[in-house]
Image: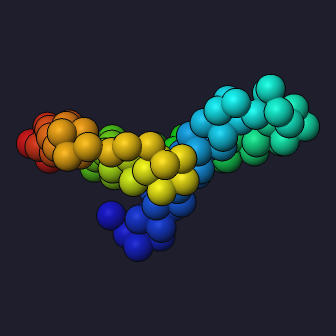
């Protein structure tokens, strides 16, 4: 994987992460308190998720799926940390272990 492809994959995964955070923010009770902010967060989530989708579509012809897909597991780990940081969600050691095991399994299957 070239450094440019690695940078694009990283950007794609960061957009995916940001999209999920915006969606959670929009749906996390904002509808009752601040509809304009909820719509803005929802629109931002759609925009960065669309960017992630189109970046991913651009990557598929350039690299092997078995090399690209394990990066999806990184997003799961980052999302777990972001949920605890931004939304004060309780992240238990058991949850961390589950995400690491799932991510590790994806990595093992993808690199086989």
Q: Position of residue 58 (x, y in %)?
A: 55, 47
Q: Position of residue 100 (x, y in %)?
A: 20, 46
In the displayed structure, does residue 89 sit left or right of residue 38?
left
**Number of numbered markers:** 0
4 relative to 99, above or below: below
Does residue 61 show up? no
- Tell me the residue at 43%/50% (across/down): 84
Decide if residue 41 is on the left or right side of residue 87.
Answer: right
Q: Examine the rendering and report whether any part of residue 81 can be seen.
A: yes
Screen quadrant of the C terminus:
top left
**Residue 81 image point, x, y percent:** 39, 54
What residue sits 46% from the left and 61% below the top? 10
Asked if 23 appears above or below 58 in the picture, the reply is: above
Residue reaching furthest to the right = 36
Give the residue displayed 65% in from the left and 32% down from the top: 28
Query: Toward which corner of the image does residue 33 lie, by quadrant?
Result: top right
- Of residues 77 and 95, the one drawn nearer to the viewer in this rendering: 95
- Which color scheme did the rendering employ for the protein? rainbow
Q: Quadrant of residue 21?
A: top right
Relative to 25, is 60 on the left or the right?
left
In front: 65, or 19?
Answer: 19
Choose between 78 and 93: the one closer to the eye: 93
Q: Residue at x 41, y 65 (%)?
A: 6
- Looking at this view, name the residue that lies furthest to the bottom: 3
Q: Residue furthest top?
A: 32
Position above or below: 63 against 95 = below
The picture places residue 2, in percent across and down from the top left corner, at: 38, 69
> Which image quadrant is residue 39 in?
top right
Position of the N terminus by quadrant: bottom left
């Amino acid at each position: 994987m070239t450094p440019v492809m690695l940078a694009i994959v990283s950007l794609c995964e960061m957009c995916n992460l940001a999209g999920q955070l915006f969606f959670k923010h929009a749906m996390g009770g904002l509808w009752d308190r601040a509809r304009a902010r909820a719509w803005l967060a929802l629109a931002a989530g759609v925009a960065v998720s669309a960017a992630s989708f189109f970046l991913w579509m651009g990557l598929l012809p350039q690299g092997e799926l078995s090399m690209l897909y394990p990066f999806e597991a990184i997003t799961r780990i980052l999302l777990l940390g972001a949920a605890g940081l931004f939304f004060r969600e309780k992240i238990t050691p058991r949850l961390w272990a589950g995400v690491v095991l799932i991510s590790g399994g994806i990595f093992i299957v993808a690199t086989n």
